[in-house]
Amino acid sequence: MGGCIDFIHFGTINDSGTFMKIGDIVECGEFGMALILGPCDVPDGVPEEALGIFLMEPDAWPTVKGWAVQLLEEDGKVLSVHEHNLYTIKL
């Protein structure tokens, strides 16, 4: 989570057109529900043929904006994820 930005970010619109912000509860792919902690940088997509290069120097890989989230259904682990992996929960 070293790339997390330490200023308040009021939210962004994800690919599905839904507004997300710090403190929201979202669905995080196969991990279940998660709490949005804040924005952060995550590695850009890594094509399979470039995996060896990425693993040699992951900090040198280009980044995109994502979110730090804390999993609520697992062990409370904190992950940095791409925004397109988060979905708002309709209550």
Image: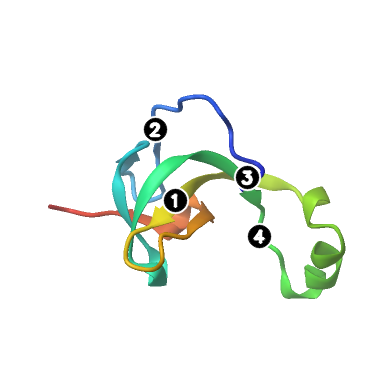
User: Percent x, y for residue 53?
Assistant: 86, 65
Point out the tag, 2 or 1, that comes first from the N-terminus: 2
Residue position for label 4: 45
Point out the tag, 1 or 3, that comes first from the N-terminus: 3
Residue position for label 1: 69
Point out the tag, 3 or 4, that comes first from the N-terminus: 4
Instruction: Specify the amino acid type for callout 2.
Output: Gly
* Element marked by disc 1: strand
Above-or-below relation of 3 to 83: above
User: What numbered label is drawn on residue 11?
Assistant: 2
* Front residue (pair 42, 13): 42
Q: What residue is shown at x 72% (from left), y 69% (from top)? A: 47
Point out the tag, 2 or 3, that comes first from the N-terminus: 2
User: Percent x, y for residue 65?
Assistant: 57, 42
Task: Measure the C-alpha gap from mark 2 to mark 1.
Answer: 14 Å
Instruction: Specify the amino acid type for callout 1.
Output: Val
* Element marked by disc 4: loop
Q: What residue is shown at x 81% (from left), y 69% (from top)? A: 50
Instruction: Specify the amino acid type for callout 3.
Output: Val
Number of marks drawn: 4
Instruction: Specify the amino acid type for callout 4.
Output: Gly
Task: Measure the C-alpha gap from mark 2 to mark 3.
Answer: 15 Å
Decide: few, some or many residues near mark 4? Use Cα within 10 Å; few <14, some 14-19, many ≥20.
Answer: few
Residue position for label 3: 64
Above-or-below relation of 26 to 39: below
